[in-house]
Amino acid sequence: MPGRVGTISPMGRLTSLLRRADTARLATLLLALWKLFRHPQTPWLPKVVAVLVLAYALSPIDLIPDVIPVLGQLDDLVLVPLGIALAVKLTPDELWLFAAMRDAA
């Protein structure tokens, strides 16, 4: 029956699955930032960016409060991925490859 309550449409299931996958990927990237921060060969600028992104992602204090309808959630969806991208861009490729090989073993 198309109007049953509690039935999830195929699109709703796909959206839910993508949301969980994005959350898992974000958690993996945040863990990678922590490892990047702790690695002794990481230059100081990527370390600073990694710490700032981790602090913002894990902090209960937001730049824009979540009670503001769209902007509150938008800052989390934009600032954290941009910070991760900046840290990745500033980090030498050898460090990312080393971390990836170490995690795979």
Image (tube, rainbow, N blue to C red):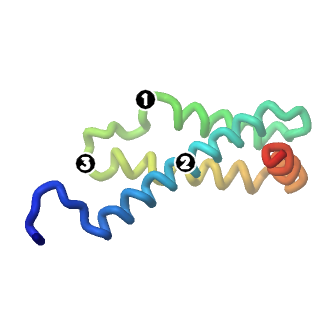
Left or right of 41? Residue 99 is: left
Amino acid type of the residue that numbered disc 3 sits on in the rendered structure? Pro
Percent position (x, y) of residue 77? 45, 52
The residue under the point 31% across, 69% down is 10
Residues packed near mark 2 inside 10 Å, few (<14), some (14 to 19) or many (20 plus): few
Residues marked 1 and 3 touching at CB (< 8 Å): no
Percent position (x, y) of residue 45? 78, 41
The residue under the point 78% across, 52% down is 90
Q: Quadrant of residue 1?
A: bottom left
Q: Earlier in the sequence, mark 2 or mark 3?
A: 2
Residue 89 to residue 69: above or below = below
Amino acid type of the residue that numbered disc 2 sits on in the rendered structure? Ala
Residue indicated by mark 2: 24
Name, please, the residue furthest toward the top. 60
Residue indicated by mark 1: 61
Q: Nearer the viewer, residue 13 or 29?
A: 13
Q: Secondary structure at mark 1?
A: loop
What is the C-alpha distance between the residues marked 1 and 2?
A: 22 Å
Residue indicated by mark 3: 69
Q: Which mark is residue 20?
A: none
Q: Nearer the viewer, residue 65 or 40?
A: 40
**For discs 2 and 3, the disc positioned in front in the rendered view:** 2
Amino acid type of the residue that numbered disc 1 sits on in the rendered structure? Ile
Name, please, the residue furthest toward the front. 1
